[in-house]
Amino acid sequence: MKLAVFAIGFSLAWMSALAQPTHIMVRAQALDAKFIGDHTGGADIILTDARTGKVLAKGRTAGGTGDTGKIMKAPNRRGGGLTDAQTAGLDLVIDISAPTLVRAEAVGPQGRPASAIHVTSTSWIYPGHDITGDGWILTLPGLVVEPKVETGVNGILAVLANVTLMCGCPIEAGGLWDSANYSVEATLIQGGKTLATTPLTFTGKTSQFAGQFAGQMPGRYTVRVTASDRTTINASVVEMPWDLKF
């Protein structure tokens, strides 16, 4: 029994002695698009011990959205890699002395808070086994929707929405992210009651969708803008208050 206890103690001491800082490259990628970095404010990343809840490291992704050809056009060869030195990411260092089940959380894009979402993933991390290259990629589904409302004559409410992918990638007619694949609508709400819904059509300008509500009376309204991709699960909902005054 004493020998067994000694062996266990020696083993733990040996593992502790071998413990060293472990690098983990974490990236946030927009679903069906590129990486979330400086262009849309990055994504906040938190690494925690999934079993104890202890925060191991945190920070925010930074850098470029990545090489469009490599990410979106070239065949994704197994092990070929999607990123380069300029692609947005975050190199975090955690200090663990034994294999640890780590939870990674990403919240973003931080520069577009109305459209930010929260995703999580877990993985076993071994001390001293750095995760580099493309790293640990967290995929964020969704769209960035930035609405703008203007009051026209006779109670007209004009609604303009700038809609992009979470990385800020543009929506264009016939483009890589084709405007024909996106559905954008505006809903006018007052006192919790839906008054009207109107489509916002692509204006021909990059990422711009527009429509209007006619004949509204003065008052306080909520304008809800929804956007969705007909080919993926990417979607978003943003609401903004609006006081209509003549």
Image (spheres, rainbow, N blue to C red):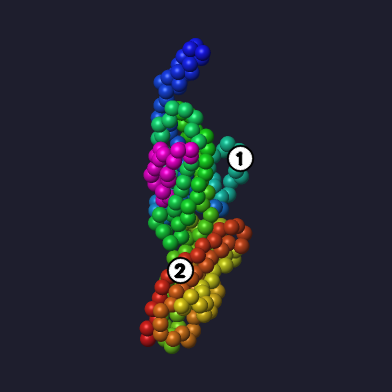
Q: From this view, report whether residue 244 is shown above or below residue 32.
A: below
Based on the displayed image, in which of its 4 quarters is residue 234 positioned? bottom right
Residue at coordinates 58% horizontally, 36% vertically from top-left?
79
Q: Within 10 angstroms of label 1, few (less than 14), some, or many (20 or more) residues?
A: few
Q: From this view, report whether residue 110 is shown above or below residue 192.
A: above
Residue at coordinates 50% horizontally, 47% vertically from top-left?
120
- Residue 125 seen in this snapshot: yes
Q: Which mark is residue 210?
A: none
Residue 169 percent across, percent down from the top left: 49, 57
Quadrant including the C terminus: bottom left
Decide whether residue 17 is among the magenta residues.
no
Q: Nearer the viewer, mark 1 or mark 2?
A: 2
Q: Which residues are magenta?
A: 42-63
Q: Within 10 angstroms of label 2, few (less than 14), some, or many (20 or more) residues?
A: some
- Which residue, given by chain and number where applicable, does mark 2 sit on? 239
Provide the secondary structure element on which disc 1 rests.
Answer: loop
Residue 84 percent across, percent down from the top left: 47, 41
Residue 227 percent across, percent down from the top left: 53, 65
The residue closer to the viewer here, 103 or 91, is 103
Q: From this view, report whether residue 107 is shown above or below residue 78.
A: below
- Which residue, given by chain and number where applicable, does mark 1 sit on? 77
Provide the secondary structure element on which disc 2 rests.
Answer: strand
What amino acid does circle 1 point to?
A: Arg
What amino acid does circle 2 point to?
A: Glu
- Give how far apart the Cα atoms at labels 1 and 2 are: 41 Å
